[in-house]
Image (cartoon, rainbow, N blue to C red):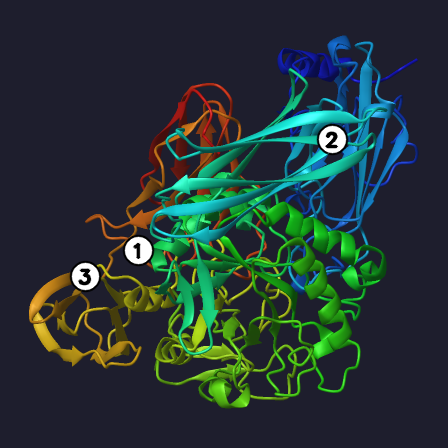
Amino acid sequence: MSRVPLAVAAFHVLLLTPSIGAAQRSTVNFDRGWRFHLGDVAGAQDPTFPDSGWPLLDVPHDWSIEGAFSDTNRAGPAGGALPGGVGWYRKAFSMPKAAASRLVFVEFDGVYRNSEAWINGQYLGKRPYGYSSFEYELTPHLRRDGGPNVIAVRVDNSQQPNSRWYSGSGIYRHIRLVTTAPVHVDHWGTYVTTPEVTSATARVRLVTTVRNASPVDQPVTLRAVVYDAAGKEVAAASSEALVPRDSVNDVAQSLIIPTPTLWSVERPYLYRAVSRVACGTKPCDEYVTPFGVRTFSFDAARGFLLNGTPLKIRGVCLHHDLGALGAAVNTRALERQLQIMKAMGANALRTSHNPPAPELLDLTDRMGFIVLDEAFDMWKKEKTKYDYHLDWDAWHVRDLSDMVRRDRNHPSVFMWSIGNEVMEQWTDTDTTAAPLARELAGIVRRLDPTRPITSANNNGSSANPVFHAGALDLLGHNYHHEAWANFPTQFPGEKFIITEAMSALNSRGYYEQPSDSVAVYYTPYDTSKRPLPNQNGRISAYDNRRAFWGSLHEESLRLFERYPFLSGMFIWQGIDYLGEPTPYEWPARSSYFGVVDLAGFPKDPYYLYQSVWITRPMLHLLPHWNWTAGETIDVWAYTNADEVELFLNGASLGVKRKPEDVSHLMWRVPYAPGTLRAVARKSGRVVATEEVKTAGTPARVALAPDRPAIHADGSDLSFVTVTVLDSAGVPVPTADQLVRLRLEGDARIAGVDNGDQISHAPFKADSVRLFEGKALVIVRAGRTAGTATLMAAADGVTPATVRIELKAGGSGY
């Protein structure tokens, strides 16, 4: 007797029926209603396998983030000290009889890792690389009689370590069910370029791959229409073509957009190309491709030019985890990260060190980021025992090709990176490096000759074999800031980008005196060298601690801004990430590199970048002002003004002029409780002020949502900052209360965090402890409009309540 969960199948009949019988394609979100089991199970691919006891969940899903931190987890601290393992996902769904002539595909945006899939017990295939997007055709194996179909996915992340950072485990990106006519636009089947752009016109070249899965040759008419951001038609073209049976035809079309609006980081303007395929008089398919019109170039002397104007690429590296949410992709969480980076003044992103979620590139298109799209962290030589080097020979061509085909229409993607610090380039004598670099660059250029290719190299030698391979359009350098000035003579005629820099180290809100004592840490790689980091797992928040291979923030930023031939630079790292807790090992479990902590709270160096990268007046004062009588405290200010005057309790402590080079301003101040006040002036005029006050005894909890209204779509998020205030409303910067949480309404707590790199408290919890005065609660909307009420209480202080509106309708994500 079949044990398929028919209630789930019936739901999907209702979901699919309205659109699936139409002539053109249907794309349906396939995230909801999966059965999940953690652990390996024999026979779980069988459609009759009894799974009714398995919990029901929605993807994206990361089972590792739900586990406990432990030094026995084989990923180790570098992998976030969280568990891997094997997991199974199963989903039942029905296809209406009206869909009998349709082709059906399932699209996965990413499964980490070693995924295998079956439909109705029939094996579909395997994808080892956890960051690749892929599809399977389900058509020949489906039931079309209204009965249940069962898709099963096995995910194997048991071989650890396989990553140098936290990877997550499971179907951690989105899934779609796509149905088409036999004649249709192929998967990732359009390629849009703008080879000629002037202020008067832009010529758009659109190549559409039309697939014919029918048994006869098919004449088609392909009509391409370009719409502007307001939905107005601005260009069109029509072509006749013959698509052979069981084959494809690449149809090239040229369209002219009059007076184009150019995509830029300030105004990221998007067009849409709609490819409509007709078989005779019958519509067969419609495929939409967003794109942008822009010109860019790299110059050996002037750096990067966008639309003819020099522009410094001021970028950050970001890993793919979302802090307390783990690897499970969420568009609002990605958007929040990018908003935080944009507010810092960043205009670029490096997808370190793997293909990103498609939603990330949709956001960078809309928000105006320049993206360095990176493929691999290793080639044939391993970095960790079970990493991608084991799959290289069989899969690297497919994985790289899929990344380029998927991402090449995004106007925010300006560069391809074929690798990060691969072991082949660590020595000048490796004979395998150059051939591999040429092979990878050749794959990319065949699919997209319009963008430059680089790789991120930590071997800065002139004899680095990758530099001499003839593969790179841009020489990508990681670190070695002391050598940047010599690049034009060391590498004559080349173009440069700093693919990775800094690796400075901080804990948010923790300060050690004096601030002008710089420490360079070699641990955990070399424990014989001094100094050793603090045993308490905290690193001073002043910009005075770094890893041995890197620099302080000020050092590299100063040099980067000085040299116009450096087209861009990517900070390591924009935001702390799970894993790689240099300079520590266990019990630390997340990184110290970010200018923003894991919870999304800026550390003080964030404001250094603001002082250089934004134009509106800014002033930031540090540290907090809760100290002990008799201490001498170094007070720093970051500003883009000319000078800052510091006052303590109304008495001036002097004016500091900002030097021409990138720098902070500093006063050495004997502590007295009260108010520090800074006044920033430009051309003699006050442009910004900031105060830091001594806080008294903790009195009450405060809750501050980043958005008081979110969409009741089951996915949207409100990020609620938790603080403790004294009786005068001053935040207590050293507060460490355990805050108990209760949430009412159709919403749930998706995660909690506080940015503490050594905390072993779970992210999925109904309480959170403040770290250096702050914590975060992530509220996820359900699907019913109304109000969610979050209540927060802690011992000895007045509790707090905040209401979050849950609005009807989709979020637009």
Q: Earlier in the sequence, mark 3 or mark 2?
A: 2
In this figure, which residue is indicated by the disc labeled 2? 242
For residue 732, which numbered disc appears in the image? Answer: 1
Q: Label 2 amino acid?
A: Leu
Relative height, residue 672 to residue 390 (above, below):
below
Q: Earlier in the sequence, mark 1 or mark 2?
A: 2
Q: Earlier in the sequence, mark 1 or mark 3?
A: 3
Spot occupied by residue 513 in the image (x, y as percentages of width and height): 35, 79
Q: What residue is at 92 percent from the left and 36 percent from the top? A: 42
Closest to the camera, between mark 3 and mark 2, is 2
Towards the viewer: 755 or 252: 252
Relative placement, left or right, of 202 versus 214 is left
The tally of labels here is 3
Q: What residue is at 88 percent from the left and 36 percent from the top? A: 41
In this figure, which residue is indicated by the disc labeled 3? 691
Q: Secondary structure beneath disc 3? A: strand
Relative placement, left or right, of 691 versus 449 is left
Spot occupied by residue 143 in the image (x, y as percentages of width and height): 84, 16
Closest to the camera, between mark 1 and mark 2, is 2
